[in-house]
Amino acid sequence: MGIYRREHGAEHPYWKLGPFKVRLPLIHHRWEWPETIQALIMFVVGMAMIPLLEKYLGLPYDVALAFVVVCGFGFMLPTILGVPMVPGWITPAIPVVGLYLGNFEPGPDAIRALIGLQLVVTLIFFVLGVTRLGSKLVDLFPASIKGGILMGAGIAAISGEIVEGGRLAQTPISLIIGGAVTGYILFSLSFRDWTEQHRWARIIAGYGMVPGAIVAMIIGWVAGEYPVPDVQFGLTSPAFDKMLDYTVFGVGLPSLDILWMALPTAIIAYIIAFGDIIVGKSLLDRVDHLRPDEKIEVNVDRVHLVTALRNLMHSLLAPYPGLAGPLFTGAMATIAERYRYGRKAMDTIYSGASIFWIVGFIALFMLPLVTVFKPVLPIALSLTLLITGYLCISVGVEQIDNATSMGVAGTMGVVLSVYGAAYGLAVGILLYLLFEKRSRKALQEHAGEAPEEPIHIEERAEEYGNR
């Protein structure tokens, strides 16, 4: 139990620190044991970035683990500083970042490129957080372009796993079965019906991706697709003494050309991240009215500033292909679901969201857990990308309300997934201007008419003939 107690209907107690509101475990809120158990398994999702750090940046495993520890520290910051969301990566942007990094040789060149990208992302979040222009900027983008960005990220996420040479070809049994179980629990309408009828189904659903990940790992070991772990005891040894050689202090600052080259990818990453903010706010809105005992404040400007701080930390100490994003959707959804059952279930939304990543950070130093999951890190990343890809495509389609916009979004999405952010944005803007953009006069004359409906030429000709 925390030292501070919340009055019924009030915002949870905090210490004021500039634009932030500091809340600490055991001082401002209690320890939550269900999130402790969940995090001891789900921390493996955070470790799943190690294969990408090795692939794109050429990092040794122990240095990559040190980078993950820096990321884990960043995961703890948002809830401590007053953001009631479980943070994560900008996961849908990972394939787009991968396409961007594919232009550089793994090693110093790729590291400088990623530092440049993360610095631009930092600047975008900071400026829009300070000026409070974040939501206005995103609203400037047409629905078809926002949909194309999400669909392109989703296509890239899924295709990267199923193309020739991808992880599906290497580990088909564990990935197919694990993906099917995870997708069924998260998205199936029939399983949702079961959760309304059976307590056991609600318990399984409450752990989000955990059941599917465990199934995939066990099958991977049984089928021989992944080596049996060499379990060791003690504490992990991240190479903190070597990590600076792989940062801006070792490889130097990126050039202006790299910063310019990174801009399209950074813009796409921001738009996706802002969508995550909206999703997180929606998840909280669903349960907020069920808990009159606590007033939840979602300050979008504070979310921007904390995300900028995390990306700056990565830019200097641990450039990260996943970037720093505002939401880990799977964990946030399960924590929000438990929060709805009252103060006895979860005292405050901050206790559940905070304890999850605090335990996840501690788990990174627990050698038995790390060595158990080390062989199956690729399957954890694959499941994350497949689920993210599905969500991105479904949310991207929801942005569209007519066939013309769908054509623009779909074409843009394919180009983005194949050629990267710059070409994707260019094609999306060009197609929007050619196919969708209409003059103000035309919009007034055809108000309410779907964009793909033809203008009645015969009627207009007759109208002009009568003039």
Image: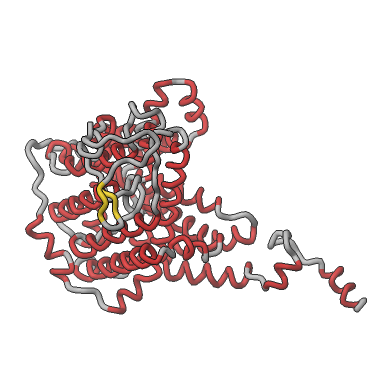
Estimate the x, y position of residue 438 in percent, counting from the top left: 66, 71
Which one is nearer the viewer's eye here, 102 or 220? 102
Estimate the x, y position of residue 74 in percent, counting from the top left: 24, 52
Which one is nearer the viewer's eye here, 444 or 216? 444
> Quick check: 466 above or below 383?
below
Q: Residue furthest right?
A: 466
Q: Is residue 224 visible?
A: no
Residue 328 horizontal side relative to residue 135, left or right:
left
Quarter of the figure with the N terminus: top left
Number of numbered discs = 0
Estimate the x, y position of residue 237 in percent, counting from the top left: 8, 48
Q: Residue at x 55, y 72 (%)?
A: 430
Q: Quadrant of residue 243?
A: bottom left
Quarter of the figure with the C terminus: bottom right
> Quick check: 50 above or below 108?
above
Q: Is residue 363 visible?
A: yes
Residue 291 horizontal side relative to residue 226, left or right:
right
> Quick check: 401 above or below 110?
above
Q: Residue at x 34, y 54 (%)?
A: 325
Name the image colouring. Answer: secondary structure
Estimate the x, y position of residue 224 in percent, counting from the top left: 25, 36
